[in-house]
């Protein structure tokens, strides 16, 4: 949004498409938009955690750590699980530290290793973002429609039969006893459903905040009209469900993807003559905050479920944490703005490349779908329908066969993050499959702990790497993978 970023492109760099950072309006903006996402998925907590049994690896890792100190039954197993988590956490953290040494420039490091050869690496697909969005929406909307259908059917039965035993899928009654469910899981489910967060509370909270936002956000961003905001809030629960569902499967929040979708939609709607670029970027911020906080809350609900904590307590804690973030994050960013006057300038210590990317995508959205690459929309339609069909097949064939059919949501993530993610997931799945064949009991007991350790170790490394960058410490080596002919040219150039 800033003038520094706008000057880097020749299009839409006029005053109505620029808004420079200010501490006051940034804090106000976050307080207005950050809490509504918490209310959007509260009615779906039972479906996500109990019915779908989504893993939420980060939430599960936190729960394992807490349970290791408080679970009376299986104390030895808990200690072994924590030991395994710590071992693989350390390995993952040190591996991230080792990789950092070789990332001194663009396209440097192990993450750029051409697994399938240099030719394939050079011809990477350039429509991956749009295909990823299409697949995510296809799978997410299918599951949302399925859940909505079950909910409406349950409501219809309850209203027509007056049978107290007929409950909604998001109700609070205990599930049917199942001998295959352990006593601990039965207790977790009972406590999780007992401490109910009323659905009416979530609906009233969502509608109330939506009304406040629709009235106040246009004062911060005049280009973002109130009816744009209303449309965003009408679509947000569906996208929040999609993001929370995908995060439960893979531990990856794809909030930026949904923000990009809002950027294209609102930017194209507003048009270039009415500040469409700034309107699209503001809409991206609104949508991103909604869907990201929704997935964060589900992570907390998973932790609460595993530790037998009150869902209400987890909800209140998330509200408090969100409020703190609304103040702390802008203050930290403001320190960067004041400390580094070349913030966002290419070639500086903090060039902010994603800021330029986001602005250019907003410019693309303002120009309309005609600016998209050839056949892009056709491919999006195909992959959207394919995701819906695959999800329907998974439901139709039963659990025994469905476990061999890929999940479209998980398939879409490599299109967004990169092919390395697909390779990592396939390798991890292969190891877990072999481990399960050799010793199923150990695989079931230690698999989540090992996975959580690997995920958290690499994630935690971003904190010290950021501190190193803030201190001006740069990686000493740039490791690139070149073809033999290219390497010969480089050697000849350096030798001349």
Image (spheres, rainbow, N blue to C red):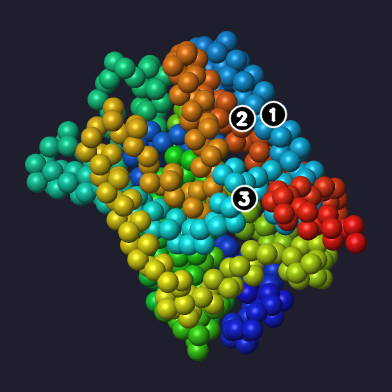
* Residue drawn 55% across the image and 13% down it: 77
Q: Left or right: 257 with respect to 185?
A: right
The label nearer to you, 1 versus 2, is: 1
Question: In the picture, which quadrant includes the N terminus?
Answer: bottom right
Q: CA distance from mark 1 to mark 2?
A: 9 Å
Q: Residue at x 47, y 13 (%)?
A: 439
Q: Earlier in the sequence, mark 1 or mark 3?
A: 1
Question: Residue at 82% of width from left, 47% of height from top?
Answer: 477
Residue 19 sits in quarter:
bottom right
Say the numbered circle drawn on residue 261: none
Q: Which mark is residue 453?
A: 2
Local crowd at mark 3 within 10 Å, few (<14), some, or many (≥20)?
A: few
Q: Nearer the viewer, mark 2 or mark 3?
A: 3
What label does residue 91 carry, if any? 1
Q: Residues within 10 Å of mark 1 (few under 14, many from 20)?
A: some
Q: Is residue 238 left or right of residue 217?
A: left
Alpha-carbon distance for marks 2 and 3? 32 Å
Task: Say if residue 309 shows up in the picture.
Answer: no
Instruction: Name the side, left or right, on which 221 lies relative to 372.
Output: right
x then y, percent, for residue 375? 39, 68
Are circles 1 and 3 on residues that touch, CB within 8 Å?
Answer: no
In this orientation, which residue lies closer to the viewer: 220 or 350? 350
Q: In this rendering, is residue 11 above or below 79?
A: below
Q: Which residue is mark 3?
A: 118
Secondary structure beneath dot 3 equals helix
Q: Position of residue 208 (x, y in %)?
A: 41, 63
Q: Are marks 1 and 2 in contact (CB under 8 Å)?
A: yes
Is residue 52 in view? yes
Dot 2 or dot 3: first in sequence order is 3
Foreground tag (1 vs 3): 3
Q: Nearer the viewer, residue 137 or 175?
A: 137
* Separation (CA) of disc 1 from disc 3: 29 Å
């Amino acid at each position: 949004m800033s003038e520094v970023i706008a000057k880097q492109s020749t299009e839409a760099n006029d005053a109505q498409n620029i808004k420079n950072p200010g501490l006051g309006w940034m804090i106000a903006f976050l307080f207005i938009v950050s809490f509504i996402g918490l209310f959007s998925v509260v009615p779906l907590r039972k479906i996500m955690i109990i019915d779908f049994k989504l893993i939420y690896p980060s939430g599960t890792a936190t729960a394992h750590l807490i349970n290791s100190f408080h679970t009376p039954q299986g104390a030895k197993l808990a200690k072994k699980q924590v030991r395994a988590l710590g071992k693989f956490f350390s390995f993952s953290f040190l591996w991230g530290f080792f990789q950092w040494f070789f990332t001194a420039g663009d396209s440097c490091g192990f993450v750029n290793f051409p697994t399938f050869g240099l030719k394939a690496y050079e011809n990477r697909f350039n429509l991956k973002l749009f295909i990823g969005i299409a697949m995510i929406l296809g799978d997410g909307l299918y599951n949302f429609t399925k859940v909505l259908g079950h909910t409406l059917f349950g409501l219809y039965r309850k209203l027509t039969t007056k049978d107290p035993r007929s409950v909604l899928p998001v109700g609070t009654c205990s599930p049917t006893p199942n001998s295959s469910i352990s006593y601990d899981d039965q207790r977790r489910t009972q406590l999780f459903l007992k401490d109910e967060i009323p659905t009416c509370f979530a609906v009233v909270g969502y509608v109330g905040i939506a009304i406040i936002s629709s009235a106040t956000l246009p004062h911060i961003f005049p280009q973002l009209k109130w009816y744009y905001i209303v449309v965003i809030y009408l679509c947000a629960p569906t996208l929040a469900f999609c993001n929370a569902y995908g995060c439960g499967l893979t531990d990856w929040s794809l909030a930026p993807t949904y923000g990009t979708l809002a950027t294209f939609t609102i930017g194209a709607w507003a048009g270039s003559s009415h500040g469409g670029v700034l309107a699209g970027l503001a809409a991206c911020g609104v949508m991103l905050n909604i869907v990201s906080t929704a997935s964060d809350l589900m992570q907390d609900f998973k932790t609460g479920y595993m530790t037998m904590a009150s869902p209400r307590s987890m909800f209140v804690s998330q509200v408090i944490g969100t409020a703190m973030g609304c103040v702390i994050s802008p203050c930290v960013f403001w320190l960067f703005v004041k400390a580094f006057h070349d913030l966002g300038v290419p070639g500086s210590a903090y060039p902010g490349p994603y800021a330029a990317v986001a602005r250019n995508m907003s410019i693309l959205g303002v120009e309309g779908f005609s600016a998209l690459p050839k056949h892009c929309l056709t491919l999006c339609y195909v992959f959207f329908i394919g995701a819906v069909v695959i999800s329907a097949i998974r439901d139709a064939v039963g659990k025994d066969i469905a476990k061999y059919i890929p999940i479209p949501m998980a398939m879409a993530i490599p299109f967004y993050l990169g092919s390395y993610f697909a390779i990592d997931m396939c390798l991890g799945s292969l190891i877990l499959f072999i481990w399960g064949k050799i010793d199923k009991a150990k695989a079931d007991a230690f698999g989540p702990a090992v996975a959580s350790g690997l995920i958290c170790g690499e994630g935690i490394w971003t904190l010290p790497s950021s501190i190193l960058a803030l201190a001006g410490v740069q990686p000493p080596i740039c490791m690139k993978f070149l073809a033999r002919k290219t390497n010969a040219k480089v050697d000849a150039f350096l030798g001349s």
